[in-house]
Amino acid sequence: MAVVLAYMSPALGHLFPFCGLLGELASRGHRIQVRTLRAGVELCRQQGFAAEAVDARIEALQSADDSGRVLRSAGSTVRILAARAALEIEDFGRALADVDPDVVIVDANCWGAMSVAETQSRPWLVLSPFIPYLRSAGSPPFGAGARPMRGPIGRIRDLGIDSVTRMVFDRPFRAGMKPVRDALNLPAVRSADELLRRAPVVLATTGKPFEYTHTDWGAAVEMIGPAEFEPPPRERPAWLDDIELPVVLVTTSSVPQADEALVGAAIEALDGEPVHVVATCPAGVDESVGRRPRVTLARFVPHSVVLDRAVCVVTHGGMGVTQKALLRGIPVCAVPFGRDQFEVARRVEVAGAGTRLPARRLSVPRLRGAVQAAMGMSAAATAIADGFAATGGMRRGADIVESQLRA
């Protein structure tokens, strides 16, 4: 059996999807070695993986809270990932030397590790735990979450978006990645799209019809559906059995951002509705907002046990929880605040599997209307669940990893 090295961005939202794929590989007898955020090391070991933390300096580099501002969020993310890339050269190189893997799986946000992977002879793949930042004909450039618009008007609009994207995203990308690529004697890359396309295979944790129907990212990109994973719960929360009403799950990001306002707004918006609000806030929230009837506030609860009772999910637009809901045919109300959340929220809206409310427009009346509208969209959410099932999931993802070993 093979030794698999997984190297990822230091975030739980990336670790969990990786664990979904790595768990399938481990069940086939492969030995798993992981480099991840420090807080995730013990979780990996509990899954039977050998694990170490990435360089602490990498984890210390975190994006600023840009409170729903698309351009600032994109620019901040690029600068952070490029700064991490410089540190990943040594850190990933050390992992390769220590583990001597047979195959490598690199996070799509680890631009330095991806560049190092180009220089070595082992088979390697990229796993994108989010919608990959790849260009596709008929789709707006990644980042702003713009609605697809076909025809001449759409092409003109997309050219305008593209010019802004190249300034806000591609220009700092080139500047940040030039010293990384130069240090490795590799050719320059002009964009994250171009860098990602240098990977032999990209595993994208999405599928149709959640992804735009016309999207074609090329033969090297394989849609494998959601990489669902949750750490085993210590015990089922006793309070969950006491809830008699349908549940609306409200979630915020595991990475600190301004989305704690979403919890308070959702509690106010659903006050008086025949539902029970369960809000999970892994990055923390003022607990006083949850002190009222038909509201349960927790820092962390396994989403799967709550989703069994849920009729709608109100979320910041994180890829993980959005897909967990849709995988079960549960509609979503997405309120994006940063990073890839703008793209996730737009896909929810375009697929008709829920609603999208920009964070800058968040108010109690608007959120109430958006949630009420989303609750009536279960048919499209079920269609997405069927599409996800058709991708083959983590079994197919593991098949693709194993095919690289035989190539």
Image (tube, grey):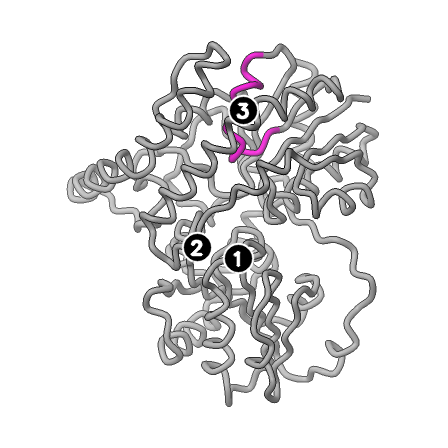
Residue 220 percent location from the top left of the image: 50, 24
The amino acid at mark 2 is Asp
Of labels 3 and 1, the one closer to you: 1
Read off the residue under disc 2: 65
Kindly report the distance in space between the C-alpha atoms of the residues bearing marks 3 and 2: 26 Å
Read off the residue under disc 3: 114
Instruction: Locate residue 159 relative to residue 317 in the image: left or right.
Output: left
Q: Secondary structure at mark 3?
A: helix
Magenta part of the chain: 106-119
Tell me which residue sits at (57%, 47%) in the image: 388
Depth check, front residue: 379 or 123: 123
**Quarter location, residue 89:** top right
Residue 133 percent location from the top left of the image: 42, 36
Of labels 3 and 2, the one closer to you: 2
Quarter occupied by the N terminus: top right
Tell me which residue sits at (74%, 35%) in the image: 52
